[in-house]
Amino acid sequence: SDEPPPLSTAAQLSAGAFAAFAAWVVGYPADVIKTRCQMEGGAATVSEAAAVIYAQGGLPAFYNGLTLKLLRAVPASAAGFFVYEYVMAVIARQRARLENRQ
């Protein structure tokens, strides 16, 4: 068949971990800005929030707290991707068994 070989457990875990890492590193500054806008007495606009954050700590201020977020999100995403792939493989095997009975 044209099916690619299944990924190893390490590859599945790595794929999930990398996806979470990349998503959070790219999206975290927007999350920091959003949180600043939602705070009581926070910025009225996104651009105002970004300007205040930058003035208070420069570019690194947009990543305050990212390490803790990654410590939670990366393992959770790795496990979630692995479980998803495992369940999909079980379903595919069951489906193939049922189709072979007919």
Image: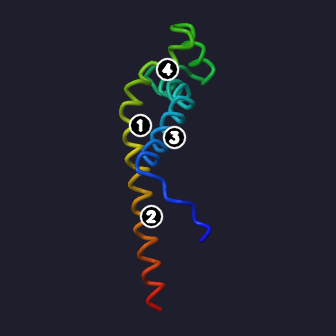
| Residue name at image x 44 percent, y 57 percent | 85
Question: Is tag 2's residue or tag 3's residue first in the polypeptide sequence?
Answer: 3
Q: Which mark is residue 88?
A: 2
Labels 1 and 4 touching (C-beta < 8 A):
no
Q: CA distance from mark 2 to mark 1?
A: 21 Å
The answer to whether residue 2 is above or below residue 32 is below
State the residue in front, 86 or 76.
86
- Residue 93, picture quadrant: bottom left
Disc number lying in front (4 or 2): 2
Which amino acid, mark 2?
Answer: Met
| Front in this rendered view, residue 70 or 61 | 70
At label 3, which amino acid type do we have?
Answer: Ala
Q: Is residue 52 left or right of residue 80?
A: right
Q: Earlier in the sequence, mark 3 or mark 4?
A: 3
Q: Which mark is residue 63?
A: 4
Give percent across and percent down for residue 87.
Answer: 40, 63
Q: Residue at x 46, y 41 (%)?
A: 14
Q: Nearer the viewer, residue 28 or 13?
A: 13
Using the image, tell me which numbered label, if any, was put on residue 19.
3
Residue with the mark numbered 1: 74
Residues at marks 3 and 4, CA–CA distance in whole angstroms: 18 Å
- Quarter of the figure that contains the N terminus: bottom right
- Residue at left offset 45%, top offset 39%: 17
Is residue 52 found left or right of 40 in the rendered image? Answer: right
- The numbered mark, 2 or 1, whose residue comes first in the sequence reads 1
Q: Amino acid at mark 4?
A: Tyr
Query: Image quarter for residue 65?
Result: top left
Q: Secondary structure at mark 2?
A: helix
